[in-house]
Image (spheres, rainbow, N blue to C red):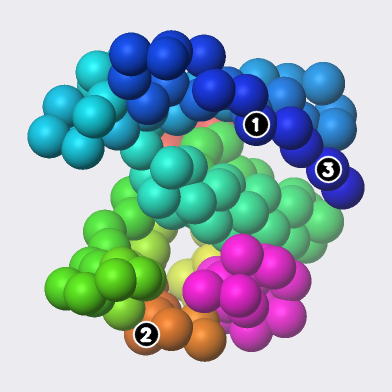
Amino acid sequence: MECTIDWHDTEGMLFVSRTGSGHIIAMDGAPDGGGQNLAARPMETVLAGAGGCAAYDVVLILKRGRHAITDCRVKLTAERADTDPKVFTHIHYAFTVTGTKLPQAAVERAVELSKTKYCSAIAMLESTAQITSSIEIIDRPAA
């Protein structure tokens, strides 16, 4: 895996990452840090990646279990240390999973497996952050 980061704004702090899979991620800073607020902050992209990793796992696990999942949303909230390096100290994953007759135990198991076995991002972040989660299941009967 690789990516290349290029500075794109000599007057500010806009950086563009080109990933090994051929995609682009823009990152910028707040104006008080020299940025122009043109894109997500680098640490926001770390948080988004962690959420994407966990959501991917949950959906895949439920699909493989042949559960009728139709939507998955995870909202992450994080706290950071007050001093440099301002690592994440607590991250909460709030999952909202929608489907038809999704068993509570299956959704809980999928979230737990993501946290304890599959999500590489959680595995790295839990060295500095307490990781917690909550689950809401919305039942949508089949049409």
Answer left or right for 36 relative to 91. left
What residue sits right under mark 3 in the picture? 2
Give whichever of discs 2 and 3 has the lower sequence position.
Answer: 3
Task: Please state the horizontal and vertical placement of residue 46, each as a whole percent of the image.
Answer: 49, 51
Kind of residue indicated by mark 2: Gln
3D distance between C-alphas at marks 1 and 2: 29 Å
- Confirm or deny contact between disc 3 and disc 1 (CB under 8 A): no
Mark 2 neighbour class, 10 Å CA radius: few under 14, some 14 to 19, many 20 or more: some
Specify start and end residues of the magenta stretch as a single range. Answer: 110-125
Task: Please state the horizontal and vertical placement of residue 78, each as a whole percent of the image.
Answer: 27, 63
Give whichever of discs 1 and 2 has the lower sequence position.
Answer: 1
In the foreground, 27 or 71: 27
What residue sits right under mark 1 in the picture? 5
Does 69 appear above or below 91? above
Q: Is residue 57 magenta?
A: no
Which element carries disc 3, helix, strand or loop? Answer: loop
Residue with the most extreme left position? 32
Q: Main secondary structure of the magenta part?
A: helix
**Which residue corresponds to the image point at 51% horizontal and 37% vertical from the top-left?**
71
Kind of residue indicated by mark 1: Ile
Task: Please state the horizontal and vertical placement of residue 95, each as a whole percent of the image.
Answer: 40, 57
Task: Give the label on residue 130, or none.
Answer: 2
**Which residue corresponds to the image point at 65% horizontal and 31% vertical from the top-left?**
5
Q: Is residue 113 magenta?
A: yes
In front: label 3 or label 1: 1
